[in-house]
Image (cartoon, rainbow, N blue to C red):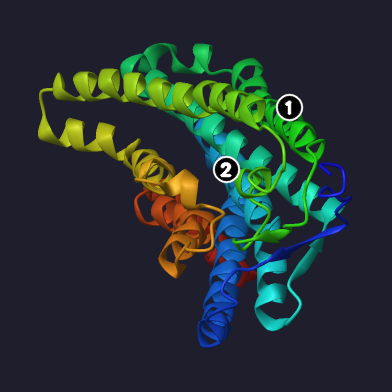
């Protein structure tokens, strides 16, 4: 009887906002505009960090990686979400769902680790400025960035493989916009305690440990800034890391709100998951990548000067 209740799934159905047809059209337009801003903003940051020699530093190398990561992260889910808003049959193949799980988790893990690396870069810049060029040489910061991508890919591959090997029953409706790995895992008709343990270990290593590194780094940074005697010196020192700190607060703040609020995990795949919870996931997946280039552009003099120089040079060439 147990075997009869199991089936080989070939597709999943994404419920999304199917119960709110008017909201679907509104959010289709809104998310499409946000996605265009993400591509334009992050693409511009990548472009100027490559073209402007003044931005060929570890900080902007990491920033270019973060911008490229945000483009990749949103591209794994937003186009399919936009299509589902306009289609009556909101289905995704099993293999497509597996790819979406892998890419989404890989990009999310990479961003956590990369933000930790960026915090260490700011720590060295402010607490050991005379040794900065020696410590953060190209032989150091390039492996740090590459390692972030490798860690994200390996962690995601391991977790995705364990999930796709689970037996699934007749229920193939994911009450979400995309194939979020925990939502898919909850559909399995088998004990998922091993998967949850692996996810707990991975979360501790690749989400909480980078957060701990960020907290420790900024503890030393704030301590060093407070030792500066002049207010102008303190302002300049803090301005070099304020953008990164703002991005960290938005990124981790959204994660903590999503996954640590009461009953968030238990209701992630249940029928009573309300629209507010789903819109929070959109904030995490769309608004944060959209805000990153705006934060770095508005709070960073070098980026603003590079953008002005780029547009002035293009205007002069015409």
Query: Left or right of 171: which side holds 140?
Result: left
Residue that numbered label 1 is attached to: 154
Left or right? Give the position of 240 relative to 294.
left
Locate the N terminus and report the quarter of the image it occupies. Answer: top right
Left or right, 20 with reference to 191? left
Residue 292 lies, in percent from the top left, at 46, 52
Residue 282: x percent and y percent? 51, 62
Q: Residue at x 88, y 57 (%)?
A: 10
Q: 143 or 15, which is in the foreground?
A: 15
What numbered label is drawn on residue 121?
Answer: none
Q: Which residue is mark 2?
A: 66
Which-is-in-front pick, marks 2 and 1? 1
Task: Identify the residue at horizontal 45%, vertical 26% (top origin).
Answer: 208
Identify the mark nearer the N-term, 2 or 1. 2
Mark 2–mark 1 distance (CA, rounded to whole Å): 18 Å
Q: Where is 170 relative to 21, above or below?
A: above
**Vertical relation: 25 (above or below) 52:** below
Taking the view exactly as shown, the residue that stands out farthest to the front is 1
Q: Nearer the viewer, residue 32 or 166?
A: 166
Q: How many marks?
A: 2
Seen from the viewer's position, the closer of residues 34 and 188 is: 188
Q: Position of residue 100 (x, y in %)?
A: 74, 51
Secondary structure beneath label 2: helix
State the SS at label 1: helix
Res. 56 in view = no
Report the residue at 73% width, 27% height from top: 154
Residue 95 visible to an observer of this rendering: yes
């Amino acid at each position: 009887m147990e075997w009869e209740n199991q089936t080989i799934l070939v597709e999943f159905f994404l419920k999304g906002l199917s119960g709110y047809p008017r909201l679907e059209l509104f959010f289709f337009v809104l998310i499409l505009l946000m996605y265009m801003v993400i591509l334009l903003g992050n693409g511009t940051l990548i472009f100027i960090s490559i073209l402007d020699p003044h931005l060929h530093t570890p900080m902007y190398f990491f920033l270019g990686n973060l911008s490229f990561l945000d483009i990749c992260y949103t591209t794994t889910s937003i186009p399919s979400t936009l299509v589902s808003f306009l289609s009556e049959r909101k289905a995704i193949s099993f293999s497509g769902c597996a790819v979406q799980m892998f890419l989404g988790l890989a990009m999310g893990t990479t961003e956590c680790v990369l933000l930790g690396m960026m915090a260490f870069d700011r720590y060295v810049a402010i607490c050991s400025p005379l040794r900065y060029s020696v410590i953060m040489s190209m032989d150091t910061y390039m492996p740090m960035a590459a390692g972030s991508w490798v860690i994200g890919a390996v962690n995601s591959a391991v977790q995705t493989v364990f999930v796709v090997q689970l037996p699934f029953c007749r229920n193939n409706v994911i009450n979400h916009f995309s194939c979020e790995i925990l939502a898919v895992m909850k559909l399995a008709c088998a004990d998922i305690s091993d998967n949850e343990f692996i996810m707990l270990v991975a979360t501790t290593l690749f989400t909480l440990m980078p957060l701990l590194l960020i907290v420790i780094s900024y503890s030393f940074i704030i301590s060093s800034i407070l030792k500066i005697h002049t207010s102008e010196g303190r302002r300049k020192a803090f301005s070099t890391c304020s953008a990164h700190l703002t991005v960290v607060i938005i990124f981790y703040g959204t994660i903590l709100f999503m996954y640590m609020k009461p009953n968030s995990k238990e209701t992630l795949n249940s029928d009573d998951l309300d629209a507010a919870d789903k819109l929070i996931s959109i904030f995490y997946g769309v608004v944060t990548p959209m805000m990153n280039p705006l934060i770095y552009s508005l709070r960073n003099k070098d980026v603003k000067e590079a953008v002005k120089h780029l547009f002035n040079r293009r205007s002069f060439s015409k």
